[in-house]
Amino acid sequence: MRTALRLLPLPFSIALCLPALADDEKPESWALCPIQDVIPAFGGAPQPSAAGSPQATRDQRAEQATSIEGDSLGGTETNLEYQGNVALSRGDQFLGADNLKYDQEKDTYVADGHIRYQDTGIRLIADTARGNQEADTHQIDNVRYQLVSRRGNGGADRIDMKGPEGSLLHSTYSTCDPEDRRWELRSRRIDINTDDGWGVARGATIRLGKVPVLYVPYLKFPIDDQRHTGLLYPAIGLSGRNGFDWKQPIYLNLAPNYDATLEPRIMTERGFQLGAEFRYLYEKGRGEIQGSWMNKDDLVRDRMSESTYDPDNQNNPDPDDGRGFLSYVGSHRFNRNWQARANLTWLSDARYQEDFGNSLYGQSFSSVTSTAGVYGAGEFWTAGLMADHWQLSDYLSSERSLPYDRLPRVYLNWSQPLSRWINVGGHAEAVRFQHDEKAGGSRLDIKPTISFPIQGAAWYITPTLAYRHTEYRLEADLAQETAVRQARAAYGVPAAQVTPAMIAEFYDRSPSRSLPIGSLDAGVYFDRETEIKGDRFLQTLEPRLFYLNAPYREQDGLPIFDTRPFNFSYGQLFRDNRYTGPDRQTDANQLTLALTTRLLRQKDGFERLSASIGQIRYFDDSRVVLPGETPLEQGKSAWVVDANYAPTDRWTIGASYQWDPKFRREDLASVRARYLLPDDGVVNITYRRRRDLLEQADFSFLYPVTPAWSVVGRYYHSFYRDASTRQEPGLLEGVAGVQWDSCCLAVRALVRRYVRNREGDMNTGFQVEFVLKGLGSAGQDTDRTLRRAILGYYRDDLYLVPPSNIAPRPDDTSYAPDPMP
């Protein structure tokens, strides 16, 4: 006798239709939800396996048979009647009913009495179910269902299916408890087709409580885990600069391995903007292209009437020109050692970054860079062939201030142990420097090294020898400029009085420099066990010496292509060059003395305390300098102190300090503290001051008032005053907001005021986001704003990013367009 009944395909469609609207990009929190399920697991039913994807589970079902059990089997040979605790099983599926009648001649069935169905993804109960197996038609009455993983639940008056097509009449969907419906999606009718993966809702309404907030007469949406073309949730904002701001993403599913998103955007104070994104993926690589364009930006014309507008500034955009940006990020892997990467950016004008960014970070950079190259890595080496190009993004700067383009750059780094006592390695680089406003040239830098690491269980000594050779091929104009600068310094005359004979004395289109570099790095580890408040700790004491010797070589005739001094910091105590690039190699006869101590909890390795102090003793004057830089004199450097202390598992306190004993002045002071509140709350306090550069305080917090309510905020203030740049103290960024969370609904509202340009003008923005958990969110992405403003808003982000150890200069960039207020 053939199998009496196939398990119904209908429940699969329920599980896939309405919940397919859910946005799974962010993990949802169900901490405030009741522990019990809306529809508990059925007793006596086989428990579905949680392993494997839903698609894999469905594929496995096709190869499995259906078993039927019941308390009694009656009827005739053609009309089977199962009665009492009827149970059908097929893989992870279970269907239970009190009674089941099956007519083999007509191939029809009727099930009634406590109908229950469950699989890996869904559980449902219903009053009756009937259908025709031959015609593949099915009907279920008075259905209630629950999605196992997404907590979605709801019901339908009736569900009709014929083959892959079906209809849900008067259906509902929500992730809220049925007794507390904070939100619910209702639809008069939903038609689905499991073959093409689409559903159509008619008369759909989203309700907050009992209040309908959105009515959609017709909505087409995907019902499976495949991508489909359609509308995504809009981003809505309000700010003083943009006015009312609506961005409506439109997703285009072009192929399994590439897609696109169009982003039309209306800003009532500025005009219409069209953005787009294209992504592709293949076996050996991936890429993403982004861009946006405005034919006319009303902000540009409005700015021309302001008193601070400078009509002579050529970097101001033309009010009749379009504005936009284009970026590309991609990679391709050739083999296990080699790959190609590119990160390219183009801006329509130098003020685009200021007008379309919404953070202080983008405005602090005066240029953006585009880089492309081929890179390799092996066990003992790394190499690359690359090129980069800079574009101005600060309308107050000039093209001449841009760094040199490196077209191209080739480099090789090598480090390999020859034996236990010998390591060899080196660095080689060849670069061609080009600039639209300045003369350029080429540079070859070679630095082989050999070191002899000697170590024991608690000590080490590492002597290192290196030889650095750097040579140039300069364009005639650059060689002329360099010779004039040297002649002025040597003869003490202004540029107008420099004679051709003076220039000829210093003129050299192929300057070079060679010198040996020796260093000795030695340290000892002392440790002891101790007990503090019942916890066992390991305390270490780690003295370290670093001696550096490099003879003086005259380098005033070398150009400055990409070199600048490091900021003085603890890491600088152990470098063999205080410059970032090879255009200058410091001369040195110096000794660093440093001491570090740590307190490590033995049961888990938690570092309760870490403190370091160090200083350099200069035995000779250091004569190598960059133009305008003061030489280092014999004596002692500033004391450098770095410390981090965690008095409890919730408190973290850190400080950095630099004190110059020669001038009896404080060069740097930084204090930071963080307290982790219960329920994922956090408080951050930071103060930092660097002499003649900045003085800032930053306070941010996420404070849970109740399990449902929390407040967020940030106050970022500058105390620094600089008369030369007309920089005044004031607010840099302020954020205040409130968050309300429930089992199935969250609302976030923020007001943000921040510096929007280099003149210090402020912008005010409002952000509101409604999160219907399990369905999606409407409004702006407040998470992005809060995650950047409050370190620890996501606990996974809790790591300290050390400040840049490179002296600031306007060629750094990190551009990421973020046009919403």
Image (tube, helix red, strand yellow):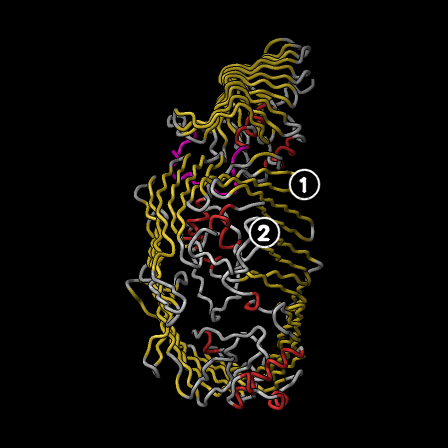
N-terminal-most mark, 2 or 1: 1
Span highlighted in magenta in the image:
21-39
At label 1, the amino acid type is Pro
- Whether 722 is drawn above or below 582: the answer is above
Give the residue at mark 1: 256
Q: Residue furthest top?
A: 76
- Whether 724 is drawn above or below 765: the answer is below
Classify mark 2: helix, strand or loop: strand
Q: Rounded to the nearest whole Å, what is the CA distance between mark 2 and mark 1?
A: 27 Å
Tell me the residue at 40%/54% (across/down).
761
Other residues around mark 1 within 10 Å, as few (<14) / some (14–19) / many (≥20)? few
At label 2, the amino acid type is Phe
- Image quadrant in which you'd find residue 383: bottom right
Q: Position of residue 236 (x, y in %)?
A: 47, 39
Residue 443 visible in the shown view? yes
Numbered tag placed on residue 325 in the rendering: 2
